[in-house]
Structure formats: structure tokens, C-alpha cells
Amino acid sequence: MNSNKAENAMRIGAPFAVGLALLLVWQTLCTAYAVPSYLFPKPSDISDSFGREWHTLFAALGTTLKITLSGFAAACVIGILIAVIFVQSKVIELAFFPYAVLLQVTPIAAVSPLIVILVKNTTGALIVVSTIVALFPIISNTTLGLRSVDPGLLNLFRARRASRLQILLRLRVPSALPYIFAGLRISIGLALIGAVVGEFVAGTGGRGSGLAYQILQAGFQLDIPLMFAALALISVAGIAMFTVMLVLTRLALSHWHESELEARR
């Protein structure tokens, strides 16, 4: 028990100590060499800018998170449904999986302008972009997980004349949960990237603008500390969402799956 507590403390304390050391080095070097804030701001400059504009930044963060979570939710539903269909028919998987790969390898920055043009509603277009970016890891991981069942258990279910639905819900899905959650942890970050890229392309401003627009606006105004503050807020949001998915994974698997049981020993 004490070793687990020490390990958990190390997981939190070690990255925090490294980050703090890097910030101190950053602050010291920028101060020693008198680097102008419009070229490369010190952490203190970024903190001051955040303190002045926190209300604007958090409002923009809310817009970006709304798009991110909407895209992520859509990717979860669509990706898991596609994976279930792939598992039911090898022919369908062979016919359509290359197009799922196409979503992954196509540069989203090149496709985003077309999506913004085709989808008249700007928010809807940004959600579509976020969904496309987050979709492939869910499809690939869920498909792999649904196929990675114990052959002996699968033969037992078939010998007991279990239906495809029973095999799916009682055997394939429980076996696939670690793979599914692994895909979700990857996709939540990609959904945020897709939302930010979409905002950059759309360039929407005003009260409903996201963090990407705040970065663009700060760049136009040469307010580099504000730009760094917005970037830092995006990073913190991504880390927070990944942490939430990690906690959900442990809550779902910690009491029965060997991967989490081994990690707790």
C-alpha cells in the first residue's frame, strides 16, 4: 500500500518538479539576456497577460471545449458503430477500412476549408472537423479489441448457440474495453486538435470565438504573452481531458481486468 502511494506521489510530483525547473530556467534566461516580450515572453509576462485577460480566455476556452466534446462524442458513436459492423462482416471491413485509413492520412488543414464552405453553420463545420480527426483511433482500436477474444470462449459461446448479439455484448465488448478506452484516450486529444485547426481555418471572431481566434488576434496585435497564455490554456485543457479519460479507464477496469490489477500490485 505504501509503495503504491509513493508511486502515485512520484507520478504527480516528478512531472511537476520538471515543469517547475523548466519554467525557472526559462524565466532566468529571458531575464538575463533581456529578451523582449514581443519576441519570446517570460513566464511572468504570460502570467500577467493571463491575469488581465482571464475572462476572455476562459470564455474562448468554453467555446473550444464545446466543439471538442461534441466532436469527440460524435466520433465515439460513429467509430464504435463502424467497428461493430466491421466485426460482423469481414467483407465489409475489407471494403471500407481503407477509407477509414484515408481519414487518418489526409491532412485536416487541407480539408477543413472545404468543410467550412460546405457546412453553412460554422459551429457545425468545426464539430465535423473535430469528429473526422478523432474518428480513426476509435475505429481501429475498437475493431482490434472486438476481434481479440479468446478463441476457446468464442467456441464455447457458439457451442451454446449464443446469438451474434449475445456474443457481442457478453464476450466481445468486455474483452474489447481496454482497447476501446485506449482509443478514447488518443481521440480526446485529437478532437481538441481538430477543433483548434477548424477554428484557425474558419477564423471566426466575436463573442463566440474560441481559443484559436484569440491566438490569431494576439498574433496580429503582436501581443505574444497573450498568445502564449492561450496556448498554455489549450495544453492544460488537453492534459485535463486525457486525465479524465485515464480515471474513467481505471474506474471501468480496475476491479476485474488484469492490466489494471497488475498496475495496482
Image (spheres, grey):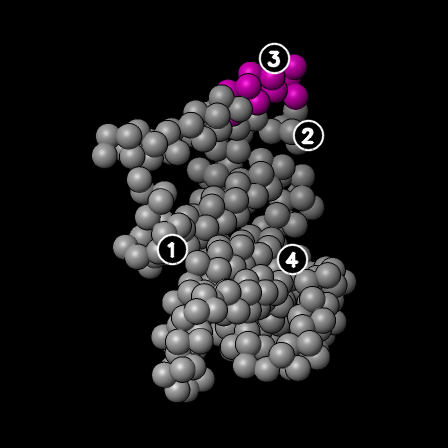
**Which amino acid type corresponds to the residue marked 1 in the rendered image?**
Thr
Residues drawn in magenta: 23-35
Give the mark toward the camera: 4 or 3: 4
Q: Residue at x 67, y 39 (%)?
A: 222
Residue 210 visible to the viewer: no
Q: How many residues crowd around disc 4 within 10 Å: few (fewer than 14), some, or many (20 or more)?
A: many
The quadrant of the image that shows the C terminus is top left
Which image quadrant for residue 138? bottom right
Task: Name the residue carrying label 4.
Answer: 197
Checking the image for residue 259, the label placed there is none
Relative height, residue 254 to residue 102 (above, below): above
Task: Name the residue carrying label 2.
Answer: 39
Task: Name the residue carrying label 1.
Answer: 249
Task: Name the residue carrying label 3.
Answer: 32
Precedes in sequence: disc 1 or disc 2: 2
Precedes in sequence: disc 2 or disc 4: 2
